[in-house]
Amino acid sequence: MENSQLLAPEETIQAEINSWLENSLPASTPWRKQQLGIFLNQGFPTRKNEEYKYTGIDAFIKRNITSVAIPPTTLAPAEVEKSFVKETGHHLVFVNGRYEQSLSSLSNDDALALKEVEDHELLNQVADPTDPLIALNSAAHPNALFLEVAKNKKALPVFAYHFLSNGAEYLISPRMIVHAHEGASLDVVHRTICQNSQNVLINGVTEITVHPNASVNFSRLQHYNDQVFE
């Protein structure tokens, strides 16, 4: 697909991402622009794409998505903590696709290292970089979260809460990378919580690398209405 033939949602996304990249870290910008180009060359997938033939994502986007701008975070810590499960572990909070360290609660755990990363070399080691939605996530994600479990260690469970808040007709791009070294073990529970958002596309990517004799159990819980597409 040539850029001159792009549909309106793709044109909007291209303009917004280019504007945002002008103020992003210089080291990551060329790579993100390359990823944006991969997406723009293909456009949003349709039912003609084998991997998406049972998912009418293009129709949803044309009707409902007008922006990739992330609505501001307005959640208070006390409001967020109401959703935490009553178990010891790492409670990681994402709001509209962005990891929010100030709203998260981490336990003491020498088995798990956690950090935000901008280094694109950690991305797309598992995900297919030619997939248009993965490329779009690589270009647009606000911050990628890297979880690394030490060799022969069992980490405390990770509870990842993805809040959708204060917005309509937008696309969000959360990104998480999990790396379990030999003999390591980790349980991750991913929960999406829709508050007052509607017509939202969650274009999330999670990459999990598991070394010999290691295990990662990843569970996804979805609590949102039919106006949210993931």
Image: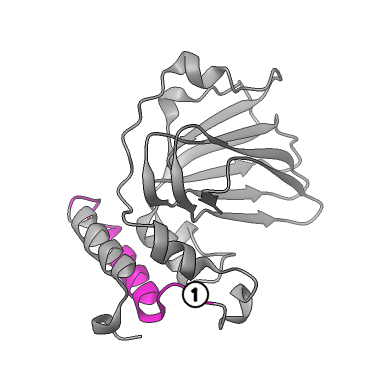
For image coordinates 57% across by 78% down, the residue present is 47
Answer yes or no: is residue 142 visible: no
76 above or below 122? Answer: above
Q: What residue is disc 1 on? A: 45
Front residue of this view, candidates 220 and 164: 164
The residue sitting at the top extreme is 78
Q: Where residue 148 sits: x, y (%)?
A: 60, 43
For image coordinates 41% across by 62% down, the residue present is 63
The number of callouts visible is 1
- Element assignment for label 1: loop
Which amino acid, by three-letter code, is at mark 1?
Answer: Pro
Residue 32 placement: quadrant = bottom left
Q: Is residue 89 magenta?
A: no
Q: Where residue 123 sits: x, y (%)?
A: 48, 59
* Quadrant for the N terminus in the image: bottom left
Q: Which residues are magenta?
A: 23-46
